[in-house]
Image (cartoon, coloured by chain):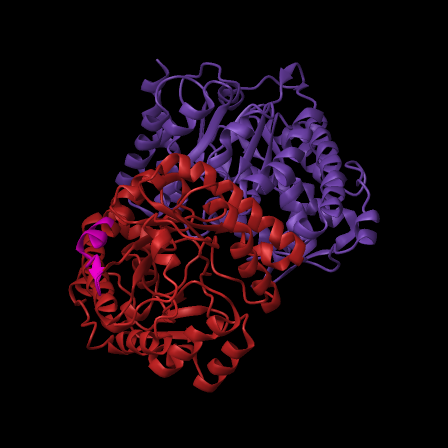
Chain colours: A purple, B red
Amino acid sequence: MTQLANDRLLRALLREPVDVTPVWMMRQAGRYLPEYRATRAKAGDFMTLCRTPELACEVTLQPLERYALDAAILFSDILTIPDAMGLGLYFSAGEGPRFERKVSSREDVARLGVPDPEGELRYVMDAVRTIRRELNGRVPLIGFSGSPWTLATYMVEGGSSKDFGAVKGMMFDQPQLMHSLLDVLARTVTAYLNAQIAAGAQAVMIFDTWGGALTPRDYREFSLRYMARIVDGLARESEGRRVPVILFTKGGSGWLEDMAETGCDALGIDWTLDLAEARRRVGDRVALQGNMDPCALYASPERIRAEVETVLASFGHGEGHVFNLGHGIHQHIDPEHVRVFIDAVHELSAPYHT
Amino acid sequence: MTQLANDRLLRALLREPVDVTPVWMMRQAGRYLPEYRATRAKAGDFMTLCRTPELACEVTLQPLERYALDAAILFSDILTIPDAMGLGLYFSAGEGPRFERKVSSREDVARLGVPDPEGELRYVMDAVRTIRRELNGRVPLIGFSGSPWTLATYMVEGGSSKDFGAVKGMMFDQPQLMHSLLDVLARTVTAYLNAQIAAGAQAVMIFDTWGGALTPRDYREFSLRYMARIVDGLARESEGRRVPVILFTKGGSGWLEDMAETGCDALGIDWTLDLAEARRRVGDRVALQGNMDPCALYASPERIRAEVETVLASFGHGEGHVFNLGHGIHQHIDPEHVRVFIDAVHELSAPYHT
């Protein structure tokens, strides 16, 4: 158990004072970095990269070598869970993730068990342990999982979907079956995140990538309810410190108040909402993480700095802001622009913390 | 000039009393209908269908033969405008719309003129005239255009885009160039919609499909501002009746108040917002059009009726509601489910208008 050299992230997530606003990026270990592409090529394919703790650790640390990031995030994929449930994840060129077996019937759902995080998913926990050892207290490590609803979309559709016809068909016509599926997923995610915390994750984030495809009613019943149940079931302390929980529903800016009610510590915010407005709506119940438009990184250094300042000013003075992009960094971003971005957050945010 | 046998749509868009809630569907003339697929096969390709007024009229009327719809909408495509500007629209299998030439530089923008609606775009106006003649006053005909921002995304990206890197790159780094492009597009859309109104369109709708990809600040500056300018420039009366204008920004539920300020008559609402909440926010300034989740049409007839009732109850009593889906109908929907949907709106809405 190492003392953290930089604990800004944990402090900001708990709305405690910091010297400058901490910053990290969703998908910061990713294809925009040539060293990531090299490791990925060495691994051969994406899932081998996820399943090999040394390689997962290597790519997790790569962005930290380049930039003054305030957090590392476990390199993994949200679909490790359905894969461990026996659905047979594979990636086909141009089509994204696919499953050999999809979940359609009562029998399919009944067959799903909660995978053992130190069994089928041990490679994830080994990656967490390896990364923590290699980080050696430099910055905190964030663990993560997909939300039950988001995982269910892939499991019922058999992969990525544009219109969610199958999963929403199940939701509308067989709500009890959908609830059974979400229930086993919520139990799985709870065990999975608790195991990540036990293995060394110092904060955890739940990615609800597809909650924003629901109506407000269906979001509360089929997505938020299960995320709230997970938040309830998480170990909130580890190594003598509180482990903050971040919820992020892409496209969920209409429902921040409801999300803040779950008992989480922070909300991820996409770029379609001003942070001033988000802060006004959730008050001091939770910290906010976000929310620069990822496309701003295509712009010139001058313009990137201006966007950083706009986002900082929108949150305003005071504590409880973790700077991030509103979604994952795009693969064609120039790594030098990322440096400008990260440095600008630290440089320009100091006046907001005096 | 024919008297309208059914003017519910126009009345509801102006918040005037109706007997039952009018209903139509975005993309109601589309691939879910076998007769549409037959006409499209006869045409050979999509743009020939758009460019042949008799065929465009044929597919426009097809859903009206099957269902008790309260409106027809011109069959066309938002990309007729950039095509008429000389960019060379084509459709490649699996990739969606593409342009032979994209707009990248100052010279590219300078080269763009406002196409003559009765010249390069005469086929659209001929379709409007043909449809009006064939409708013979049965229901009103809605004309439409893409918004300047939405058209600009296709023109700068050279087709569909997932992340809008090129168009947002231009927006961030060359805002004056972006404004020049949006300016010529706003003038074009104004002339195009006015010509549709002169040719017989009885209501018009502006589709801002990609406004929701912007931050609130950029939305106001690069999308809403130009839609407001168009609304200002439209002929609001024709054939002795007011011509209602509907604005629809997909993913724009955060900005309804600003949209209502443009002077439009109605707002399209996607399914991520309850109509009760939308109505509370815009008051009686505008009518609301929407907003059933298009995926509800995958469900059973019983469940479809329940969803219709939920949406009707959410809007509540009183005038100013046009029922629609929150986005276009999906291609794999069973046409019999559509009948259940349309009939349910009329049957279940009567109590809300007493």
Looking at the image, is B279 positioned above or below residue B266? above
Taking the spot 32% from the left edge, 26% from the top edge, the residue there is A313
Quarter-of-image position of residue B110? bottom left
Taking the spot 79% from the left edge, 43% from the top edge, the residue there is A120
Residue B69: within the magenta?
no
Looking at the image, is B141 positioned above or below residue B171? below
Place of residue A325 in the rendered image (x, y in percent of width and height, measured from the top left): 44, 38
Quarter of the figure with the C terminus of chain A: top left
Place of residue A306 in the rendered image (x, y in percent of width and height, measured from the top left): 28, 35
The boundaries of the magenta stretch are: B228-240
Residue A77 seen in render: no
Left/right placement of residue A243 relative to residue B50 reads right
Taking the spot 67% from the left edge, 35% from the top edge, the residue there is A226
Left/right placement of residue A107 relative to residue B72 reads right
Taking depth in this image into account, of A23 and A262 the one nearest to the observer is: A262
Taking depth in this image into account, of A23 and B194 the one nearest to the observer is: B194
Taking depth in this image into account, of A4 and B37 the one nearest to the observer is: B37
Quarter of the figure with the N terminus of chain A: top right
Taking the spot 40% from the left edge, 40% from the top edge, the residue there is A338
